Amino acid sequence: MKAKQLKIEIREVPGTDMIKVMHFSGELVSECVMQINQVFSDLTDQKQLFVIAEMSAVTLISSAALGEFMGCRKRLLEQGGDLVFSGIKIDIRTKLNLMGATKIFRIYTDVRSAIAAYNWEIGHKPEKINLKFPPFLKIVPPIRQLVSRIAKQKGYGNRDSFRIETIVDEICNNAIEHGRNQVGELIDLSITIDPDKIEIDVTNISDPVKLETLTTLLVPDNGSDKKNKADLKRGRGLTLIKMLSDELSVDSTEQGTSVHVKKVREE
Amino acid sequence: MAKNEHPSLDNQKLNCLNMQFPFALDITFPGDLEYIPAIRKFVAEILQVSSFSPRFAYRSEIIVDEICNNAVVYGCHSENAEISLSSRVGSDNIEFIIKDQGGTRENITRLKKAVTTDAAEKDESINQEGLGLEIVRMLSERMDVVIDENNLTSVHIVRKREDERNKI
């Protein structure tokens, strides 16, 4: 049976000239190796080093073609670029997995995800997640888990993710404990993450009754009795956040309290 | 108002400890598939801490996964596209509203068809491609899609607590 002819089409990515998408269609049999090699050579000659191989219309990848992709990727890596796959059909992906190729190549579900991953890595483009939640303590564990999972998904290590989780836990608990807890009032959590750092902002409505305690805890230690008394049991959370983060600022007024934390990626 | 099980605590502290239904929870995240596993787990965990059964939580997780996947794949085209997921958790139900910036005319027509037509009436192509929405329909009490004049798509889903109904 005759193999479906391979077609390769190179497409631009709007908004960036650093990334190129190679749309493959047909069967990548061993006879296609030279064709694949030529297309990659043309791109590297033009200094187009970040490539997405879009495979949703590919029905077969032979081991020879896979070996050629590995060689092309190696050449791109040597020049500071990379090659990733997108849209690979589930049956082909299973075979690649069995061959161990998924340990070498990054595979994305679609071109958009692959472009977003490149923008994240090359462009250091921050991504933002906003959450509004009610002031219930039981909700904090899922929130800390959410932020930790996102950090891990974005490539942060276990230690960084755990520290981020601890910071989120602490500031969300503080917002609930020291803010106004009325039905229908929500606390704002905003996460801005890029490959180098994560910034966490929590804003809540101040409770006038608790504002004095909160401002006492926020005053730097000046040896006063009032501060010392408060320090006995309270304020350890903020000290912990200071230890774990690279920047902490708290702005508390009668209208609202906002906490900003910056944590630089360590690993 | 929840019964005071902790007489030593004032009402403010009680509000923090006891969850009061219904409550709202809104999340906005980038239109990228890699966020969805974390979001679906988050929804499941919120339901579990709200005393819904693990089965209810898991089924709701599937709904969120499916609708958010559709929103990213068909409704996010610009580089900075975002998905908004609003949840309203009641004592015996949950409502989701998932919004995206809207897809192409073709995709919107397919979505409308998939939502409005009964499974038996659908043509073969929709039956093959619209299985995700079919699962959502099976798992939910109600599903509506609103598409405004700017193609902004909003999917509204209601699920009711099923624990008692399914206890045999």
Image (spheres, grey):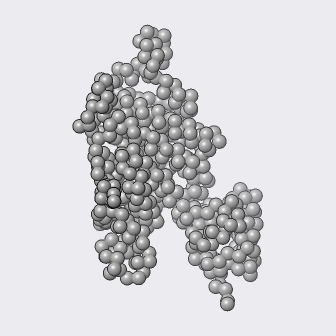
- Residue shown at 61%/52% (left/top)? A121
**Between A127 and A213, the one nearer to me in the picture:** A213
Kindly identify the residue that appears in the image at 32 percent across and 47 percent down.
B24
Instruction: Report the number of discs.
Output: 0
Q: Is residue A129 left or right of residue B150?
A: right
Q: Is residue B84 at least partly visible in the picture? A: no
Residue A165 placement, left or right of A215: right
Instruction: Give percent across and percent down for residue A219.
Output: 44, 19
Residue at (33% x, 59% y) in the render: B168
Residue B17 lies, in percent from the top left, at 35, 34
Quadrant in the rendering for residue B167: bottom left
Q: Residue furthest front?
A: B168
Furthest toward the bottom, the residue is A1
Q: Nearer the viewer, residue A43 or A160?
A: A160
Location of the N terminus of chain A by quadrant is: bottom right
Towards the viewer: B60 or A186: B60
Q: Position of residue A18 (x, y in %)?
A: 62, 61
- Left or right of B119, for residue A5: right
Q: Position of residue A47 (x, y in %)?
A: 69, 63
Q: Residue furthest left?
A: B1
Q: Residue at x 62, y 66 (%)?
A: A85
A244 vs A217, left or right, is right
Q: Relative to A166, say whether A99 is above or below.
A: below
Q: Residue A223: in sight, yes or no? A: yes
Establish if B5 lies above or below B130.
above
Q: Quadrant of the C terminus of chain A?
A: top right
Q: Is residue A102 above or below residue B50?
A: below
Name which quarter of the figure residue B145 lies in: bottom left
